Image (tube, coloured by chain):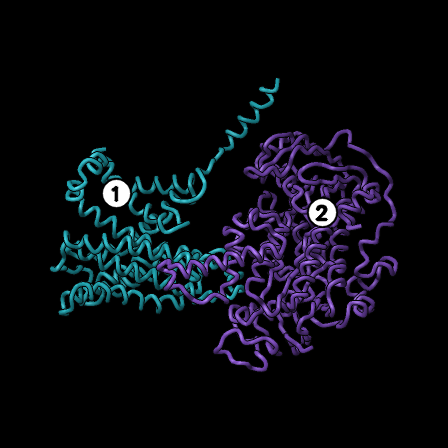
Chain colours: A cyan, B purple
């Protein structure tokens, strides 16, 4: 409760006290936008933790070894993630549904275990120190980027490109009969998603002094997926709401902070049962009538008639 | 007159099945061209070859876009475009639009959005400009919206009433119309309609016919596939008949309908009835032998339904229906699309829950019992559209039908028996069920239903989308099952055929029972003929 009281009565104090939390919310919201783009085009890809790692490592390595300014390093990280996504996407995007999900998780793990843990420049699993990190300054680009990216992706969903994504999500066969180049538009969504994830990874290195390879595994993947599922994917604001809610939750209910994963899991299950369309989305709560309830009602009806 | 589409010796085999076996044909510019043939003749495969969903193994498919200017400046005016190696979206981009036999709308998008997506190829790629919503672009948006609403009107949908509804909430006939509107949004040179009138009643079919004629009058070339001979013979200038992947006739309607090869293909070699039963005259067939005038309502019904009401959200699909099915009867529910017939069946099998009313099957209360329990009690449903598992083999589909049973050994023996009873299935037991023709799939679905040992079998639209010859064999199967002691509740569009075999029937309209009586009596009832037989 204190959390909200402070938010409304003393926003400046709140901001100062929770700066790191706000930064993390912003990064997670960008990750949520990234996964939204692929969801919107009907693809269940879970590769974003990997693209995040590419963005993060590229930025830090360039910081360490090159004289280029930080914004350039960050953009380079995001672009490299996009480049890798083309190579990964060519074979992988032929798959659909759960097979695509498995293949992209495979990419995340192959990148982490195969590349990051074995290449000397990445610290071989020891992680990398990032001396130029600036936890307080790092929040500014995050807070500027988030609304811009949210706006752009929101607009994107209403363009010709966004309509093509909708069509592919609904029915690939029908989409191609309407002249939509399905593989191309899927690839565009995959690349945009990768660039956004890479950018989020680059931003995150800026608020942490240390790049930790264990951050970019399956746990992260599932966490990003949860934002989208809990928030809903009918429009871009759903996953953002999901990200804000799930990231802030441990702070709001401090007493449960150590059960964070348990609480997240319970929320995920509740949303899937009662609001399968997510928090943001059309319609109300799904009404589940258990079998005993139906039987009980049926028994009651003839009784009432008498 | 010049050919717009030209197929030369096109061939496509799936394993040993010669789906399309060396077909050549020409679709003339500005005509309505009919493609007909019994089920499994290769019509849909041919359309899939033309639209690029399936690659041909040999032969050429050429588009001659001669009379109209090229779609894009870069393409130039080439004499003929070979379609055989192009992907589907590129072929659509050349101006060939199609609808699908099984509806393929963007179900969760609104009707307007469906049509807007159809304009994809005509819309300049303005994605980057659209990121900033500028006035001139908004005006383009408005223009597109206006055009989409006009297209809805063209096909007979009301943009105000239907435009903002999600496609899946439209009635079946409206969904078919919406699919045509979406195809028209491409501004096609050639429109391919794959069974646009499937599952429609005669009045709706007339409207489809008017629509096709109107589009053609506006200069559109149409390739029409349908089973309704009256529709095809009525609108087409030229017809090609396929059978087993080969062209067996080609010419104007009058020539084709009198072609002995065509009559044989449709009616089988032992034409069962008089010569009047050629394609196109089936709805005249009202003077068939009458059944012994049987019962009214059964005294102790096997199935009893009273005041049943079922709603989908705000829409009341069934508004107080009462009827009964006695042991050993064939009872038919007939009526137009959207009348609520399938909803009634789905409620009886426990898939849907009624809002009010009583439904009893023996001692079992169908309004509350779980679907699996209903099946175990001996009430099995063969759903509309067959719902077979296309990738599994025929045998695997049957085995799944027996999955819930504990007596595995007996179930296997029964599957073997059924394979013998229905040789069509026995011969194809290792083939993926998706490769069977529509009629064969229907027989598979019925055979699968029999594995549940039903005392009452619910059949939902068993003749949907089948050629007359195939309808005959499906109805033969139904009568055979009935003679073995299974009670049958049949839902049918094909009212005439249903009334021929039914002891009693109910006419359902907008969720209510309008008429009831013996099959023979209803068949003679002028009101029924008028409403459902197009008389």
**Residue B141 x/y as whole percent:** 46, 58
Locate residue B357, reporting x and y percent. 63, 30
| Helix, strand or loop under label 2 | strand
Query: Label 2 marks which chain's residue?
Result: B
- For the point 51% across and 68% down, the residue is B89
- Asked if the residue under mark 2 is in contact with the one under mark 1, i.e. CB atoms within 8 Å, the reply is no
The residue carrying mark 1 is A248
Residue A295 to residue B525: above or below: above
Dot 1: element: helix
Write the residue at 65% across / 34% down.
B319
Distance, label 1 to label 2, CA atoms, is 57 Å
What residue lies at 52% left-to-right and 48% top-to-bottom?
Answer: B164
Q: Which labelled disc corresponds to residue B97?
A: none
Compare residues B434 and B420 and report the one nearer the observer: B434
In this orientation, does residue B373 appear? no
User: Which residue of the protein is positioned furthest toward the top in this rendering?
Assistant: A306
Looking at the picture, do discs 1 and 2 lie on one chain?
Answer: no
In the shown orientation, is residue B305 left or right of residue A258?
right
Q: Which residue is mark 2?
A: B492
Q: Is residue B8 left or right of residue A267?
A: right
């Amino acid at each position: 409760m204190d959390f909200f009281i402070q938010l409304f009565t003393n926003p400046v104090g709140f901001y100062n006290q929770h700066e790191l939390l706000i930064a993390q919310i912003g990064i997670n919201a960008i990750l949520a936008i990234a996964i939204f783009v692929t969801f919107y085009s009907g693809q269940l890809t879970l590769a974003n933790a990997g693209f995040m790692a590419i963005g993060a490592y590229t930025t830090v390595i360039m910081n360490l070894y090159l004289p280029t300014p930080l914004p350039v390093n960050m953009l380079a990280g995001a672009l490299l993630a996009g480049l890798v996504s083309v190579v990964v996407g060519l074979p992988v995007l032929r798959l659909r549904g759960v097979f695509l999900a498995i293949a992209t998780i495979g990419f995340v793990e192959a990148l982490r275990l195969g590349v990051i843990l074995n290449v000397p420049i990445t610290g071989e699993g020891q992680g990398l120190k990032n001396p130029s990190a600036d936890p307080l300054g790092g929040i500014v680009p995050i807070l500027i980027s988030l609304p811009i990216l949210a706006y752009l992706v929101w607009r994107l969903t209403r363009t010709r490109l966004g309509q093509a994504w909708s069509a592919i999500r609904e029915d690939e066969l029908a989409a191609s009969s309407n002249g939509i180049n399905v593989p191309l538009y899927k690839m565009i969504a995959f690349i945009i998603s990768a660039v956004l994830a890479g950018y989020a990874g680059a931003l995150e290195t800026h608020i942490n002094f240390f790049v930790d390879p264990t951050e970019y595994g399956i746990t992260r993947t599932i966490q990003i997926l949860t934002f989208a599922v809990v928030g809903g994917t009918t429009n871009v604001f759903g996953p953002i709401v999901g990200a804000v809610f799930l990231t802030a939750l441990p702070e709001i209910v401090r007493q449960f902070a150590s059960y964070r994963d348990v609480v997240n899991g319970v929320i995920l299950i509740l949303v899937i049962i009662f609001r399968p369309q997510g928090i943001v989305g059309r319609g109300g709560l799904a009404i589940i009538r258990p079998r005993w309830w139906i039987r009980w009602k049926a028994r009651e009806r003839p009784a009432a008639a008498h | 007159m010049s050919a717009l589409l030209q197929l030369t010796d096109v061939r496509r085999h799936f394993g040993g099945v010669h789906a399309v076996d060396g077909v050549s044909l020409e679709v003339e510019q500005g005509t309505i061209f009919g493609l007909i043939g019994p089920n499994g003749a290769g019509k849909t495969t041919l359309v899939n070859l033309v639209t690029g969903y399936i690659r041909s193994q040999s032969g050429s498919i050429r588009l001659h876009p001669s009379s109209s200017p090229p779609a894009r400046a870069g393409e130039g005016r080439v004499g003929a475009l070979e379609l055989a190696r192009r992907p589907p979206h590129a072929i659509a981009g050349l101006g060939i639009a199609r609808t699908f036999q099984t509806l393929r709308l963007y179900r969760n998008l609104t009707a307007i959005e469906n049509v807007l997506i159809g304009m994809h190829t005509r819309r300049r790629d303005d994605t980057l400009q659209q990121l900033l919503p500028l006035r001139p672009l908004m005006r383009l948006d408005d223009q597109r919206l206006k055009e989409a609403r006009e297209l809805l009107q063209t096909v007979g949908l009301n943009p105000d009433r239907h435009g903002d509804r999600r496609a899946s909430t439209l009635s079946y006939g409206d969904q078919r119309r919406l699919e045509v509107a979406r195809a028209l949004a491409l501004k096609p040179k050639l429109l391919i309609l794959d069974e646009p009138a499937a599952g429609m009643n005669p009045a709706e079919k007339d409207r489809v016919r008017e629509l096709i004629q109107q589009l053609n009058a506006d200069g559109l070339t149409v390739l029409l596939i349908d089973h309704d001979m009256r529709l095809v013979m009525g609108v087409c200038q030229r017809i090609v008949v396929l059978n087993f992947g080969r062209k067996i006739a080609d010419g104007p309607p009058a020539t084709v309908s009198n072609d002995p090869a065509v009559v044989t293909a449709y009616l089988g070699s032992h034409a069962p009835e008089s010569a009047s039963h050629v394609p196109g005259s089936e709805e005249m067939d009202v003077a068939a032998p009458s059944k012994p005038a049987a019962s009214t309502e059964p005294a102790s019904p096997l199935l009893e339904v009273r005041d049943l009401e079922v709603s989908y959200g705000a829409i009341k699909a069934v508004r107080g229906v009462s009827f009964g099915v006695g042991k050993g009867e064939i009872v038919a529910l007939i009526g137009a699309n959207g009348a609520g017939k399938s909803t009634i069946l789905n409620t009886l099998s426990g898939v849907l829950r009624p809002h009010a009313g009583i439904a009893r099957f023996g001692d079992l209360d169908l309004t509350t019992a779980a679907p699996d329990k209903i099946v175990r009690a001996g009430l099995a449903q063969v759903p509309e559209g067959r719902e077979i598992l296309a990738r599994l083999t025929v045998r695997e589909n049957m085995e799944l039908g027996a999955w819930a049973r504990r007596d595995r050994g007996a179930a296997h023996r029964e599957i073997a028996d059924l394979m013998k009873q229905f040789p069509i299935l026995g011969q194809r037991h290792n083939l993926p069920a998706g490769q069977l023709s529509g009629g064969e799939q229907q027989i598979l679905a019925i055979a699968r239903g029999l594995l549940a040992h039903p005392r009452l079998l619910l059949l939902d639209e068993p003749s949907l989308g089948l050629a007359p010859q195939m309808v005959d064999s499906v109805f033969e199967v139904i009568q055979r099952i009935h003679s073995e002691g299974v009670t049958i509740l049949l839902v049918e569009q094909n009212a005439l055929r249903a009334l021929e075999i039914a002891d009693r029937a109910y006419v359902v309209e907008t969720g209510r029972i309008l008429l009831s009586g013996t099959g023979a009596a209803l068949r003679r009832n002028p009101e029924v003929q008028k409403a459902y037989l197009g008389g």
